[in-house]
Structures are given as C-alpha cells and as structure tokens.
Amino acid sequence: MRREKFVFNQQTLQYDRVVEPLRYTILRIFGFCCAAMVSAVLMLLVVHRYFPSPSEQLLMQENDILRSQISSTNDELENLASVLENIQDRDAGAYRIMFGMEPIDEDVWQGGRGGHDAYENLRALPNSGEHMASLREKVDRFRHQLDLQSRSLDEITNMAKDKEKMLASIPSIKPIRSDRYSRKIENLSGFGYRIHPILKVEKMHYGIDFNCAAGTPIQASGNGTVKWAGKRGHYGNCVIIDHGYGYESLYGHMSEIDPAVKRGKEIKRGVTIGKVGSTGLSTGDHLHYEIHKDGVRIDPIQYCYDGLSTEEYAALVQASQQSNMSFDSH
C-alpha cells in the first residue's frame, strides 16, 4: 500500500495531499523483506546451534563416538606397532644372527616414502583431515611391517628346516654305543701320531679305534648316502657315508656289512650298517672310524659328543690323545 501524507501549502494556506512514489514503496517493501529474511536466518542458526533437532542430536552423538573411536584406534595401533617392533628386534637380534642372516634394513622396515604426500587428499579435509591422514599412514606402515615380518619368518623357517637337515646329517654320534665297549674308554686309540702295531714306530693315525668284541653293531653317525660298501685296501670291509655339507664318515675292518647297506642307499643316523671285526690290515677286533671334511681327514673326537656330559666328553678327548698303540695302520 502506498503511503499518503499532507503537506501545508503556505500559498493556499491549506494542507495538500501528497502520495508516496511507487519506487519508494517498492524499495521500502524490499528492505523490510530483506530484514525479515536476515532475522529469520539468524534465528534459524541460533536455534540449530543451541536447540538442535533430534536427528541432529543423533548425528552429533555419532560424531563424538567416531572421534573417540579414532583416538582409541590410534592408541591401539601405537601399542601394536610397539609389539611388532619388539618382535622385529628379536628377529634381527636373535633368530637371524643364529642362522647367519642379515637383519631387515631399517629404512626398508620403516617404509619411508619420499616426494609426493600419499595422504594429501585426506589432509585437505577441514575438520578431521590431519587425524584421518595420520591414522591412514599408521595403518599402511603397520601393514607394510607385518608383511615384512611375515616374509622374514618364512625365511627363518626355511633356514631352520635346512639347518635341521644339516644338523641331522653332520656325523655327531659315536659309531659304537658306549655300553658295547669291551675295554675302558682310556684305551681308545685316537687321531694323531701313534705307535704302528707292526713297524713299532710312530705313524700318523687318521681316525679313532673303538676296541669292541667281534660282532658288535656299528651305527651310522649321521644321515647320508652310502658312497662305498665293500672291501677297500687295508680297511678291509669298509663303509663310507656321504653326509653332505662336505662331511663323510668311514667305518673300517668290519666283520660284515649289513646286506641293506649298498652304494646309493639313503641311511639314517643310528641305523646299524654292519658289525665290528678285524678284516684288512688289523691286529685285533675293533672299529676304525674316520671323519672327512671337504676331503681332508680330521679328528673324529670333535664329532663324538652324543650322550656325554662335559666331564665325560673331556675324558674322551684326553683318552683319544694319549700316544698309545693303534690297532691298525691307518
């Protein structure tokens, strides 16, 4: 509605009726509407801020729970990362050293990435960006380290299996059971210069002579493959077992060789391969036992530690080093 007003006319001495121009009326209405809208928006903001609707209250509660869960998950990741670091330390400081393996490189373990920020999009989020980027980064690093540790354990497991096979193959038990000796342990003739039983002069003796009664069972000192089974010069009836890893064991002067022990046959540690005798160049019933490493004959006493205490092993070593007479010429 357009406004009217009366203005005193000094010439006519009367009040003249004046009607408001249309444009002023429109501007006035528009200004009133704008003021009303601004007031309404402000009221709406105040109401939403201090008097949220039930659905908004649920959303706010959910946001609070999510923030709490993010914080809790972040703490749990920190704890898990600490546990994984401890496992990695044990991996590098014990298991890998035990098997002669290089530890995991620290830079590879940390999974450092240079250049582009892989979490740039998350960081761009105005409210939760940094929290989400940090959480995502920790999850990715944790996954990377778990993968590395899993691969490392696989390597260690394979190495342990190979080590187990090697330990089972290396000759490490006496070829004659201790309770089968016919003479005291002090009468062993060991590795080194000994009195030749025929020439009566000192001569190098490349093995250990186990003095036993004829027919005493002889056992393989480690897993391996039969390289020789039959007569072999001064050794008489002889068995040679290739244990792999550069090791061979030789058993000489046997009265008989077990029929199942043939060249190429797989042999397990402790299996009977024949019996004690005095075949070949020998002066009495005994077993001549040698260990070869990479083709070189070495002192077998270093590989006869089965079932012995430290004191018993020391006594065996001492007995084998005495300069007594050997029972053969090897």
Image (cartoon, rainbow, N blue to C red):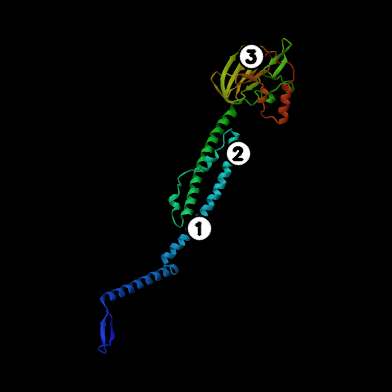
Identity, as a three-letter code, of the amino acid under mark 2: Gly
Mark 2 sits on what residue?
A: 93
Q: Are marks 2 and 3 in contact (CB under 8 Å)?
A: no
Q: Left or right? Give the position of 278 relative to 164.
A: right
- Which mark is first along the chain, 2 or 1? 1
Q: Position of residue 277 (x, y in %)?
A: 66, 16
**Please, is residue 153 above or below residue 186 in the view?**
below
Query: How far across and how far down the image is residue 38, in percent?
Result: 37, 70
| Of callouts 2 and 3, the N-terminal one | 2
Provide residue 157's location: percent of width, then percent of height. Answer: 54, 35
Q: Residue at x 51, y 55 (%)?
A: 71
| 73 lies left or right of 11 | right
Give the Cα separation between the discs numbered 2 and 3.
48 Å
Q: Nearer the viewer, residue 23 or 228?
A: 23
The residue that mark 3 highlights is 235
List the residue tagged with mark 1: 68
Three-letter amino acid code of the residue under disc 1: Ser
Q: Give the CA separation, mark 3 to mark 1.
A: 82 Å
Judge depth for marks 3 and 1 and give the one in front: 1
Quadrant holding the C terminus: top right
First-in-chain label (3 vs 1): 1
When asked about the image quadrant of residue 12, the answer is bottom left
Q: Disc 1 on helix, strand or loop?
A: helix
**Residue 183 image-quadrant placement:** top right
With respect to residue 170, does 237 lie above or below? Answer: above
Residue displayed at 60% across by 35% down: 97
Say which of 141 and 55 sits in front: 141
User: Farthest residue toward the top?
Assistant: 199
Secondary structure beneath label 3: helix
Residue 214 at x, y percent in the picture: 67, 17
Helix, strand or loop at mark 2: helix
Residue sitting at x 35%, y 71%: 37
